[in-house]
Image: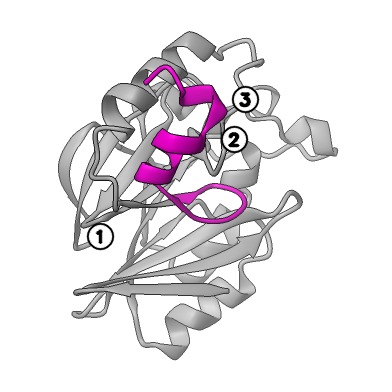
Amino acid sequence: MDGVGIMSIEIKQFITGPIETNTYVVSDGEKKCCIVDPSSGCEAVLAYIKDNALDAGAVILTHGHFDHILGIPEVLKEFPTISLWVHPLDVDLIRRADYNGSLMIGQNFSYGGPLHDLKEGRRNIGGLECTVLHVPGHTPGGCALVFEDHCLSGDSLFAGSVGRTDFEYGDGDLLLRTIKEKLLTLPDKTVVHPGHMGRTTIGREKRMNPFLQEY
């Protein structure tokens, strides 16, 4: 578990699920919080929220792959009325196990409950202000979330790498273009919290990411 505090926003990282997904709890000084990308095995996530008396208002899904959604039932068991947000272009992944990849690990997982549209722009989700950036290519509806000077990039941008695009709905050229247009235009000091592995910054990725050297 790793924590970063800035101004009124705090971001806690938990490693969850079968392929070490980064699940995040984003909270503010008013005790509001959102859960981002819950994979399976969310006990520590839920305990953190309870122990700190946080008000969990929303689950935000950066995209619909299995390793970012397997924890939905665990979260709903603890918070039955919590709202779930995903970009409209990734709803099919949430609804279909053959799209979201869960069949590859021997699970047949999908979620058929209500979903809210995670559309691009400035949003108040679960009581927290953020900017949603649509960054397609890894999946059609992949998004990044900007909270102050921190960016939760999902599986679009990693430290030294970018998301894979060899799925039937993937588009490598589109991913690189939208990373450059929407993420690399953020301030260099912006801390990037990816869906897997460790943190980085926008400035570092501009200088050192081999996939982005044409920027």
* Residue 3 appears in the figure: yes
Amino acid type assigned to the residue bearing label 2 in the image: His
Q: Nearer the viewer, residue 192 or 29?
A: 192
Q: Give the colour scheme of this rendering.
A: one colour
Query: How far across and down, in percent of the image, does residue 194 sit?
Result: 50, 48
Q: Quick check: 87 above or below 15? A: above
Q: Nearer the viewer, residue 58 or 133?
A: 133
Amino acid type assigned to the residue bearing label 1 in the image: Gly
- Per the model, the C-alpha gap separating discs 3 and 2 is 12 Å
| Residue picked out by circle 1 | 126
Q: Quick check: 96 above or below 148? A: above
Query: How far across and down, in percent of the image, does residue 56 sit?
Result: 35, 69
Does the magenta portion include 39?
no
Q: Quadrant of the N terminus?
A: bottom right
Label drawn at residue 164: 3
Query: How far across and down, in percent of the image, does residue 160 sit?
Result: 57, 38
Query: Is 32 left or right of 47, judged from the image as shown?
Result: left
Which mark's residue is nearer the viewer, 3 or 2? 3
> Which of pointers 1 and 2 lies earlier in the amino acid sequence?
2
Residues packed near mark 1 inside 10 Å, few (<14), some (14 to 19) or many (20 plus):
many
Disc 3 and disc 1 in contact, CB within 8 angstroms: no
SS of the residue under disc 1 = loop
Query: Is 161 left or right of 129, judged from the image as shown?
Result: right
| Region of the chain picked out in magenta, as a range | 193-215
Disc 1 and disc 2 in contact, CB within 8 angstroms: no
Based on the displayed image, in which of its 4 quarters is residue 210 positioned?
top right
Label drawn at residue 65: 2
SS of the residue under disc 3 = loop
> Which of pointers 3 and 1 lies earlier in the amino acid sequence?
1
Based on the displayed image, in which of its 4 quarters is residue 179 positioned?
top left
* Residue 71 appears in the figure: no
